[in-house]
Amino acid sequence: MHVKQYRLNVFLLATAQGFYLVSAVTGITFAGLVGQMLAENKLLATLPLAVLTIGTACSTIPMSLLMKRIGRRLGFMIGATAGAASSAVAAYAITQSNFALFCAAMGLMGVYQACSQYYRFAAVESAPKDYVSRAVSLVLLGGVLSALIGPTLAVSSSDLLAPVPFAGAFLVASLVSLLALAPLMLLKIPLPKEETSDEGARPLSQIIRQPVFIAAALNAATSYGLMVLVMTATPLAMNGCNFSMVDTGSVIQWHVLAMFVPSFFTGTLIHRFGVLTILYTGMGLFALSITFSTSGITLLNFGGALVTVGIAWNFLFVGGTTLLTQAYRPNEKAKTQGINEFMVFSAAATGSLTSGGLFNVSGWDAVNYGVAPFLVVTLIATVWYQLGRTPAVVPVDLDSETP
């Protein structure tokens, strides 16, 4: 594809990513609080977020295979439409104090979230060969838009349907999801054609046994699962410490900024220092976040922990995605990407499902100490890949100039 069209596609995908994440921030900020408000059993407070990530995990493989048939553009538009419908149903469920319907709406939101995860792969597929890591980073820059306006918009619209709290925020999120259709309609990504390779397609079981796949998938899955585990419990912990919604929204805003602002330079860092160095740095930052979280309950502690987690997520997620491109042949793309996304959001579902119960039963410190074992497993898998790799599977050398 011509570089000019690639740049346009990246811009459109980044814009769509921004609209998606503005809507997603509403769920991040309020779903746990809505669950706390509507659920009779407070241990189920974070069940809506768990249903969201389960819905995402269950949709990743079907949406990957569907987009192989109908193309990325139409698949992305289906996702945005599902997002608009789900947020509207969520707003209605809150007005009716219907916890089950709210959970169902979050499950439908999973379709939107699943589709949006393929924005970065669409950018990679339309990118010149030497821009893989940069393509991922540039699409994730759409998250800066969501970080700047998402939490403020969510908090300011939360009483739009007063006296019912939070419903207005989900109604606004529905409208924002519809706005995402505009850039998606302008995408020009060729309809998929049958991918070929000099070698035949391998069985999925063989692909996922590769050390490079295991390292890539574990880094991406760990980044999402641990980020969701900590982030989901944060509004509950801050509420328990009597912080205002403005303070909570501010911490979430800085967290989302920390997730996506590094995308300005993550690709360059991978080019300069190598993908493995960035992965190890991300693991170290996750470990540092435990220190922030467990050393106090001030606004600085919560903010420092969430900012550190955000940067760690970016390094592991971009690095894992870059590494994944080395794990499959062209004719293995759809199924490999699908199983990777399934693993990522299975981890996210586990994080959100256990977050509320762990917090309510064992407290905020237990949530943060729960990060450590998964970091150790990911570290071992990455070192295993590094020790056994050959030059043939080293990530591509990236051009030093941004397209």
Image: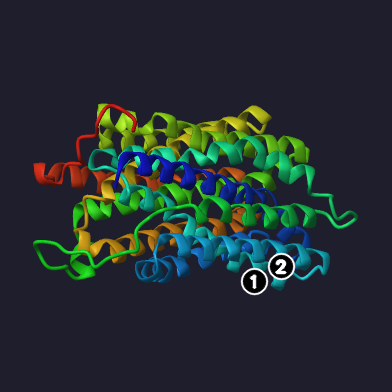
| Residue where numbered disc 1 is placed | 104
Which residue sits at x=56%, y=34%? 257
Relative image position of residue 265 (x, y in whole percent): 39, 29
Against 95, residue 33 (above or below) is above
User: Looking at this view, is 175 or 39 the one in front?
Assistant: 175
Colouring: rainbow
User: Mark 2: which secondary structure?
Assistant: helix
Real-space Cα distance between discs 2 and 1?
9 Å
Residue 205 to residue 164: above or below: below
Closer-to-camera residue (114/174): 174
Q: Disc 2 marks which amino acid?
A: Val
Residue 74 placement, left or right of 331: right
Vertical arrangement, residue 152 with respect to residue 349, above or below:
above
| Quarter of the image where the C terminus is located | top left
For residue 183, the mark is none
Query: In the picture, residue 314 is in which quadrant?
Result: top left
Left or right of 104 in this view: 79: left
Q: Earlier in the sequence, mark 2 or mark 1?
A: 2
Camera-side residue of 312 and 156: 156
How many numbered marks appear? 2
Task: Residue type at mark 1: give it.
Answer: Ala
Given contact means CB atoms under 8 Å apart, are the residues at marks 2 and 1 in contact?
yes
Q: Is residue 330 left or right of residue 102?
A: left
Which residue does the numbered mark 2 point to in the structure image? Answer: 89
Horizontal and vertical percent position of residue 50: 57, 62
